[in-house]
Image (tube, rainbow, N blue to C red):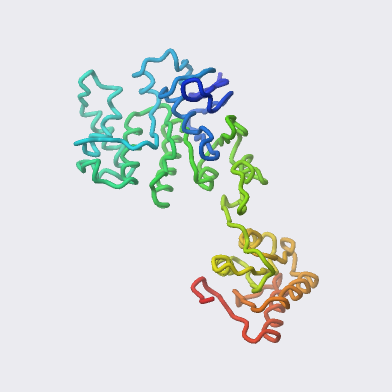
Amino acid sequence: MSDAVLQTNALSAGYSRRVIVDGLTFSVSAGKICTLIGPNGAGKSTVLKTIAAQLPVLSGTVALCGDDLSTLHEKDVARRISVLLTQKITAERMTCGDVAETGRYPYTGTLGILSAEDKRIVHEAMELVGAAHLYDTDFRQISDGQRQCVMLARAIAQQPKIMLLDEPTSFLDIGHKLQILSLLRQLAKERQIAVIQSLHELDLAQKFSDTVICIRSGKAERIGTPEEIFSGDYIASLYEIENGTYDPRFGAAEPAAAQGDPEVFVIGGGGAGIPVYRRLHRMGIPFAAGVLHENDVEYPAAKALASVVIPEKAFEPVSEDAVSRAMSVMQRCREVICCTEYFGEMNKGNLRLKEYASVHFPSPRCCENEGADL
């Protein structure tokens, strides 16, 4: 028997009779995080709203904890699934505590009076998201990021089996993004909640998801683990990246390299050259980089940003051929920048490049830290 708490079968989602996403079939088990990714306008939010019963199912089915969504009363849905969407919440004359307490309404009577236990659950939820100090603060007087945390506390207080979140990291700084997604991972594991979310931050989707669903052109184009989705050139294809590149190993996008023959040759390695690459790119100066081992941490950045890269195979000493090719490129540059003082046994060839530059260039520069002036 399946342990899935959310299942869709041939689901069509949209507005009125207009289908946005069609034929969507997937399931999410308790304790797992499923993330929807895809271009703007692909229909991620539409899918989430349909699963949350905020939009009618156009065709197909949605099952929550084994029961068809269409057969469930509104309060039954609210007890099984909590929702955090991106739209602004209007909360006139409500404190943050009042807003978080609405997460307990599916469990109260008609008058919505909270018990002492309800209050405890709300306080615990606000502590979890780091918003306890905002309990008595007017909801209208806090930042967008703080509002996101309060709304997440509301969703947690609802004690759902399933959490739906549309871009939960919107408006948050990087510290709070990591805090929120780590908290969702903790909640999924410890409370066996199934989390379904949409994210634009691909690096975070790669790190915090068990399953990734790729939505494009009205279809679930791919469904798989992060390792299956974030490989090869697929992400660049999914988002139709033309003016730049995407490295699936690091979840990083890079702009396109400056056009033209290289004017500066950069001797880097071990990450020391990355700040120089970025600064040259910002200045619009085409440059060459090498010799870089293909497993060097800075190789992906050099490959994306440099006009020319002289590579060497991973774990092999820098070869005579690579040094010769590097010198040939260097001779056509007006300047050389060396970003490292240390050259190990595998990297002796780059020491030869530095020595060559010191003889053949008037003033080759050393740039050993990201603050060095170019």
Q: Residue at x 69, y 64 (%)?
A: 293
The residue furthest right is: 321
Query: In the rendered image, which quarter contains the C terminus?
Result: bottom right
Does residue 3 appear anywhere in the picture?
no
Q: How many marks?
A: 0
Apparent side of residue 62 relative to residue 336 in the rendered image (left or right):
left
Q: Position of residue 30 (x, y in %)?
A: 48, 28
Q: Quadrant of residue 222?
A: top right
Seen at 56% across and 76% down, the residue is 367
Instruction: Identify which residue, 289 or 105, lies in the foreground.
Output: 289
Check the image and name the residue furthest to the top: 71
Relative vertical location of residue 9 with respect to residue 119 in this rendering, above or below: above
Residue 73 point in image, percent of width and height: 37, 15
Residue 284: x percent and y percent? 58, 67
Q: Is residue 132 above or below residue 42?
A: below
- Residue 30 visible in image: yes
Please state the horizontal and vertical placement of residue 289, each as a whole percent of the image: 66, 68
Quarter location, residue 49: top left
Q: Is residue 272 left or right of residue 168?
A: right
Which of 179 and 31 lies nearest the eye of the viewer?
A: 179
The quadrant of the image that shows the N terminus is top right
Q: Nearer the viewer, residue 191 or 44?
A: 44
Q: Residue at x 69, y 78 (%)?
A: 351
